[in-house]
């Protein structure tokens, strides 16, 4: 996890895709950029649109959150950019408070047999 430099909150590693970048490649890149840790993507955890977010410059954004479970394959955990002020490993029973979508991702990542959680899936199935 990283302690974000903008809010001071602990969070799972997040980031934005580059134009044309696939989600798995973006996740691998973001984890390396932010923490110095090399990972491989194992599986999809969740897909959901987040609530409206307003950036410091006033831009309004609705993020599409794609949660992926990754496995460490190399590197040493450290603060590796200016987006965080600390990097840490936590026992799953002692994780700091997370935003609801991140807490859901962690729960799904810890359950080896869990299907991906897709927001609105039951609503879509009922209307089809």
Image: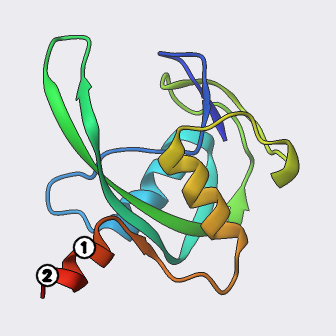
- Residue drawn at 59 percent across, 68 percent down: 70
Is 52 situated above or below 47?
A: above
Relative horizontal placement of residue 10, taking residue 77 as reference (left or right):
left
Q: Nearer the viewer, residue 69 or 107?
A: 107
Q: Position of residue 41 (x, y in %)?
A: 53, 73
Point out residue 28 in the picture as x, y percentages from the top left corner: 48, 61
Q: Quadrant of the N terminus?
A: top right
Distance CA(mark 2)–CA(mark 1):
6 Å
Residue 61 visible in the snapshot: yes
**In x, y percent, where is residue 10?**
64, 30
Report the number of discs.
Answer: 2
Q: Quadrant of residue 123?
A: bottom left
User: Which residue is depicted at the point 72% across and 69% down?
Assistant: 110
Residue 91 at least partly seen: no
Q: Is residue 122 left or right of residue 14?
A: left
Which residue position holds label 2? 127
Give the structural element (helix, strand or loop) at label 2.
helix
Q: Name the one closer to the observer, 98 or 122.
A: 122
**Do tag 2 and tag 1 residues touch (Cβ < 8 Å)?**
yes
Against 110, residue 122 (above or below) is below
> Disc number at residue 87?
none
Q: Residues within 10 Å of mark 1 (few under 14, many from 20)?
A: few
Residue drawn at 26 percent across, 28 percent down: 53
Judge by depth and name the residue closer to the eye, 111 or 19: 111
Question: Which image quarter is the C terminus in?
Answer: bottom left
Foreground of the two, 78 or 9: 9
The secondary structure type at the circle numbered 1 is helix
Tell me the number on the disc at residue 123. Answer: 1
Give the vertical position of 53 relative to 90 (above or below): above
Task: Name the residue furthest front.
Answer: 126
| Residue 32, position as x, y percentages in the image | 54, 50
């Amino acid at each position: 996890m990283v302690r974000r430099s903008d809010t001071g909150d602990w969070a799972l590693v997040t980031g934005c895709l580059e134009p044309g970048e696939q989600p798995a490649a973006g996740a691998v890149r973001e984890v390396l950029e932010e923490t110095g840790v090399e990972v491989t993507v194992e599986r999809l955890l969740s897909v959901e649109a987040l609530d409206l977010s307003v950036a410091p410059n006033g831009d309004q954004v609705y993020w599409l959150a794609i949660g992926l479970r990754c496995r460490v394959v190399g590197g040493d955990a450290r603060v590796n950019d200016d987006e965080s002020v600390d990097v840490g490993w936590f026992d799953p029973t002692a994780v700091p408070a997370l935003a609801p979508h991140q807490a859901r991702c962690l729960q799904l990542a810890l359950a080896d047999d869990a299907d991906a959680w897709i927001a609105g899936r039951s609503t879509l199935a009922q209307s089809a």
